[in-house]
Image (spheres, grey):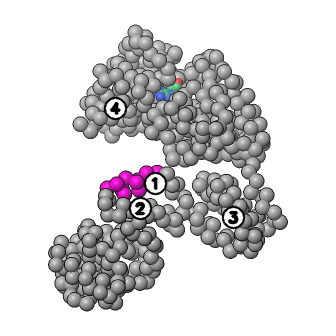
Amino acid sequence: MDYLPIFLRLTDEPALVVGGGSVAARKVSLLQQANARVTVVSPELEDSLAQLKTNNEINHIQGQYQDDMVRQYRLVIAATDDAKVNQAVYEQAKAFNIPVNVVDQPALCSFIMPSIVDRSPVVLAISTGGSSPVLARMIRSRLEALIPASYGRLAALAQKYRSAIKVKFENVEHRRKFWESALEGKVSELVLSGRDKEAERVLQAAINNSDETILDEKGEVYLVGAGPGDPDLLTFRALRLMQRADVVLYDRLVSDEIVAMVRRDAEKIYVGKEKSNHAVPQRDINKLLVRLAQEGKRVLRLKGGDPFIFGRGGEEIKDLFHEGISFQVVPGVTAAAGCAAYAGIPLTHREFSQSVSFVTGHLKDGTFNLNWSLLSQPNQTVVIYMGLTGLEIISQKLIEHGVSHDMPAALIQQGTTRNQRVITATLSTLHNKVKAEDVVAPTLVIIGEVVTLQDQLKWFDPDESSGIAIGNALG
Ligand code: SAH
């Protein structure tokens, strides 16, 4: 190890930054985040530093760096483009045993600045010993994705209860066990899902009660939106709960790639429905969720898209609510948003469409009673879920209610996946065009002027077999 990682307390300590440009400004900002009292020495200041000076947030010594200036500081950073000044700052700081860093010159540094993941009070510092700042930044962005934003709040909570728990569990071993089960289990999950008050109640109960069994895991249900297919569209929270679950119930819309990302040893139960061939009836799914949670399991109900958009999420949580089972709902990218983005069709546009409706083309009893006159108003986009079977009737109804028969319309098959296909036509021709193709479920229909933008934007190349509409948008 060429450098010893340490965390320096700088609150109210004087720190010196030599230089007044943008690099210096970044270092000043970091030092301020650590509550240092910052002095900048430089003949001139760039705008943001000048602003800090006006606000009295930094002290400014206007002029060139002079010998011995480093003397009264706890820490010194040089960020000038004058090699002589940088060298002088380094030598004098060394002479006074003051930690010094000259930006981008490892040879003139007694300490180096790491890449930082800040979840204060949790802070991760990554260093490659100056060998590759780019690599450090890459590692940092991976860790950023891995560590939930709310870990800071979790640590703050642990800090708040630390001494009380110490009094409660005198035995070190018991104490360690307690914190392990709190931070790996219930307390952590409550904080990460934003239920900090409940987490505090659990800790408080543990302090008031005579045993640590208060943290015993009760079953709970996570109703999680898995997005339209591309695993990259999962949320961080979805991924975390997928890793936590003991058992997962998933259906046809959840891609194999996504199911493969669930904790390896979790039990996996397929409850999918083929059209008019209900594999597991909805009421049985609802009952199963309740039973598994009552057995004490962490149950993941993984659903395509968003659980509350044509996802029966509302029906599934009703029973959980009645049975007093704790649950959380995690939103997902709904098919309309995913398909539209990957097909290059903006759902709204200031010129063409000021509103968007999501409707279902499939009702429980097989009939439609959509508000046709509302859906036929101009300047809007209509997105139809489950609309393949009813496409012909839907198109007819809209035309009857005044929509032009040449209104642009698109059908997107298996949107956001490698098999995505986009078929564009008009309201009167889409149905036949789709019939002539070998279309595979799931499919989504988008009707409105915005469909023409797909052409203009050229986000999607119909000749490309993969059909994923990203590259062209940039090129
Ligand atoms: N909760 C889901 C919708 C479930 S209803 C969501 O928010 O997306 C099922 C319908 O969603 C399908 O019939 C189809 O119309 C649409 N759908 C879901 N995923 C899709 C995809 N990848 N491509 C096209 N349509 C999709």
Query: In the image as oriented, which residue stretches furthest toward the right?
Result: 210
Majority secondary structure of the magenta segment? helix
Which tag is nearer the camera, tag 2 or tag 1?
Answer: 2
The region drawn magenta spans 134-145
Labels 2 and 4: the sequence-earlier one: 2
Q: Residue at label 2? A: 126
Disc number for residue 469: 4
Q: Which badge, 2 or 1, comes first in the chain's sequence? A: 2
Residue in view at x 57 percent, y 25 percent: 252
Is 109 or 195 nearer to us in this picture?
Answer: 109
Instruction: Please name the amino acid that badge 2 sits on.
Output: Ile
Tell me which amino acid carries mark 4: Ala
Nearer-the-camera pick, 68 or 475 = 68
Q: Left or right: 287 with respect to 68?
A: right
Q: Earlier in the sequence, mark 3 or mark 4?
A: 3
The residue at 46%/39% (across/down) is 233
Residue drawn at x 33%, y 75% is 110
Mark 1 vs ligand 1: CB under 8 Å?
A: no
Q: Which mark is residue 176?
A: 3
Tell me, yes or no, whether the two marked residues, 2 and 1, touch with CB atoms within 8 Å: yes
